[in-house]
Image (cartoon, rainbow, N blue to C red):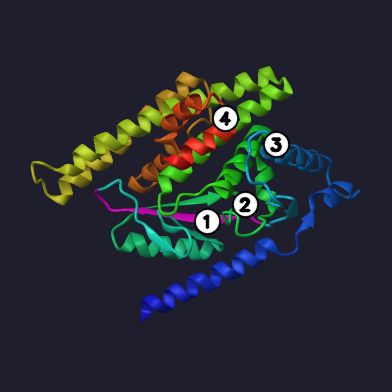
Amino acid sequence: MLSGCSTAKYYSHAVVGHLQLTTGQTPIQKVIDNERTEKEIKRQLELVIELREFAETKLNLDVGKAYSKYKHLDRPAAVWVVYAAPAFSTELQSWKYPVVGEYQSKGFFKESMAKDYSANLKEEGFDVYLGEATAYSTLGWFNDPLLSTFLDDSDEELAEVLFHELTHRTYYLKGDTMFNESFATAFAQKGVQLWLKEKGELKRLKKYQDTLRRRDEFRGVLQEAKTQLGLIYKNTSNDPAETLQKRKQEFFQSFKRTCLNLRKKWNSNDALEGWIDEEVNNAKLAASSIYLLKVPYFTELWGQADEDPKVYMELVKKL
């Protein structure tokens, strides 16, 4: 009965949170035409119009009326996302939802609720990672708004987030988190590169591709970390939990040093900041993995489709 009450409370909060994000929207063009709108906001919204058209006509994505209206949020995130993994495993906890099936995270529209839920999971012995999501997708069930949180980063990152969410809207495989996120990540990255090529922005394209190479290098580090942790947690010598915990902490300290070496190699003072300066645990490692580890597979599939977005989408659906 308590579980039922908790579930009802969560879905009630989700309905209210969704309504808060989807009401009070303003058509993007109207915001652009408003004389009181800041110049930089106008420029970014004009860019969104361009990106929506590119996504529909060049990437063959289901755009519809998604992200055609603007909603300002007085907060840094659209959703706070909780990930959890057992103390000695990198397998993420799953939750079941209507429509989408199982998903390896739980989202909250209120930061306080996300923190309380995270604290309860920690008390149960889970490793927990609480992340902030700037984007919000209803997978095509509604026309999602363009939130002010989309506009906090570079044009390339804005394009990547928009293409990523529109990919979810176009095709979503129920119950497979890593498939969906890795696919959307890979397709969005290819979409950004096509967009920059078409614009003739070769310098920006090279800079973006350099960023992707760094991500791929970090993906390899993540993959190796999961492999090494798997060997530790397998515990073939049947060591006590205290010994496993010590090995685990020693490993994560070593992982941080690896990240620091990557930062130096890249000559970037703020690279991997969240991995070097903040807590790293099983949940954080696994959460990042679902977005990155299968990207090379979907990138290879892009080549098989001769870099044709329509053919690519059909290949993915056949999987």
Residue at the spot 48% in from the left edge and 33% down from the top edge: 272
Left or right for 35, reference 156: right
For residue 136, say whether it is visible.
yes
Q: Is residue 111 magenta?
A: no
Relative height, residue 80 to residue 112 (above, below): above
Residue 206, image quadrant: top right
Given residues 69 and 270, the one toward you in this image is 69
Quadrant the N terminus occupies = bottom left
3D distance between C-alphas at marks 1 and 3: 32 Å
* Furthest residue toward left: 237
- Residue 114 placed where, x, y %? 48, 61
Of the residues shown, which amino acid type is indicated by label 1? Trp
Earlier in the chain: of badge 4 and badge 3, it is 3
Residue picked out by circle 3: 57
Mark 2 Cα-neighbour bin, 10 Å: few <14, some 14–19, many ≥20: some
Q: What element carries label 2?
A: loop
**Of the numbered discs in the image, which one, if any, rests on residue 34?**
none
**Of the numbered discs in the image, which one, if any, rests on residue 80?**
1
- Residue 209 placed where, x, y %? 56, 22
Which segment did they paint magenta? 75-88
Residue 217, image quadrant: top left
Q: Is mark 1 on a helix, strand or loop?
A: strand
- Residue 255 placed where, x, y %? 34, 33
**Of the numbered discs in the image, which one, if any, rests on residue 190?**
4
Earlier in the chain: of badge 2 and badge 4, it is 2
Q: What element carries label 3?
A: helix
Residue picked out by circle 2: 76
3D distance between C-alphas at marks 1 and 4: 27 Å
Q: Give the foreground label among 1 and 4.
A: 4
3D distance between C-alphas at marks 2 and 3: 32 Å
Q: Give the foreground label among 4 and 3.
A: 3
Q: Does the magenta stretch include residue 86?
A: yes
